[in-house]
Image: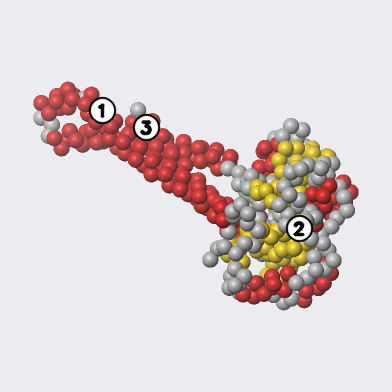
Amino acid sequence: MTIIGIAGCTGLMLTGFGIRDSVDDIPSAQFDGIFKYDVAITLSNTDGLEKLEEYLNNNEKIENYVKVCATTGEISNGTAKINTTVFVPDSLENYQNAYNLTDYETNETLKIDDDGIIITDKAAEILGVKAGDNITFIDGDDVYYTFKVKNIAKNHVSHYVYMSKDFYEKNLKEYKTDIVYFNTKNISDEAQDQISKDILGFDGVASVSLISSLMKSVSDMLNTMNYVVVILIVASAMLDFVVLYNLANINIAERQREIATLKVLGFYDKEVDNYINKENIIFTILGVALGLVFGTFLTSAIIGSIEIDKENKIITTKDSGEEGVLGDDCLIDCSQIPMIYCNYDTQDVVDITLDDLQVGDEIILAIRSSEIENLQKEDDNKAKIAVEQLQLGTQRIK
């Protein structure tokens, strides 16, 4: 019983530390390891794209940029469905500047090509598909497409599909640039802010988002889990102490006659104590060793099941315009987007969360033109739309 009790407590403690360390690494693994860009420019249309590219090419502080078509929809295996975003780079030559795709098992670098699609590992696990299987993609117009899964990529936040431009145009629709990712050289925050302000002045630019803001948003969400982990670790340590104390007392109480015999035979109290303590130490070492093995498997199982998916962060909005495209009852998908507040008096900009929003607040949304087009085709009274950035317009936060 001593070995089993200590093994269980040790396993729980190890799991707590393992979850904490793994969760802390998720933001950097996703936004440093997989997403390689520094800034994302969301376009509402491509009217100013040519001038924007000229600016990016001529700015010495910008290292490179990647144009991408982004389409939201669902992927399905015939029974289950999950929301996803399809990323289609304009060129296969430089998309690695925006995405670092690696195999979820071998960690080998994956390449986007015309032979099939790449989906992320958690999506593949939920749908029960593997490389070589077919999946169905359902776009915003409720049109079904069947694609072959060529590779499965490692991913930590949300679900994505990657395909080449030729594959996209051959199997879906005409390519249109929705997002431009770019990387800056080693510049100051002030210089990066100035570049963002310059870009916002171009026609068709809906928003400019820093990867650091996305990382902070995910980090803030994951930090709430630390409280649960701390409780788990403290409770496991206390339980470990209680188990050791009680089992030691029970062991001594059950062996009173044996201990009395040892004393009659001439054993000193110190020798009797050493005799009992050696047993407890041996059992503790065996229990800890077994607990480490148990905790390793338990941690792997829990971490493998963790899915950072913010799709349930939905708000309902009413368009302020009389003939606004959002209508009176539109569901806004606020998953994995930067949310900010700008103080109009001081011009200070701070990050916020959904907890900072109140019923009746005015918000300013950056939405891709493709999303608006899909929304206008919706017959549903409550359509859901993905946005690129949310700004709290109501002047309330000091």
Q: Are discs 1 and 3 less than 8 Å apart at CB?
A: no
Say what amino acid the circle numbered 2 marks.
Gly
- Mark 1 secondary-structure assignment: helix
For marks 2 and 3 on the same chain, the one whose residue lies earlier in the sequence = 3
Residue closest to the eye, 396 or 272? 396
Q: Which residue is labeled 3 in the image?
A: 5
For marks 2 and 1 on the same chain, the one whose residue lies earlier in the sequence = 1
Determine the residue positioned at 78% across, 42% down: 380
- Is residue 194 left or right of 383 when viewed as pictured? left
Vertical arrangement, residue 347 with respect to residue 109, above or below: below
Residue 335 in view here: yes
The colour scheme used to paint the residues is secondary structure
- Is residue 148 left or right of 99 when viewed as pictured? right
Determine the residue positioned at 43% across, 47% down: 230
Residue 121 % position (x, y): 67, 43
Residue closest to the eye, 2 or 169? 169
Quadrant of res 242: top left
Q: Which mark is residue 250?
A: 1
Q: Which mark is residue 321?
A: 2
Say what amino acid the circle numbered 1 marks.
Ile
**Front of the two marks 2 and 3:** 2
Say what amino acid the circle numbered 3 marks.
Gly
Determine the residue positioned at 59% across, 72% down: 345
Residue 9 % position (x, y): 39, 37
- Mark 3 secondary-structure assignment: helix
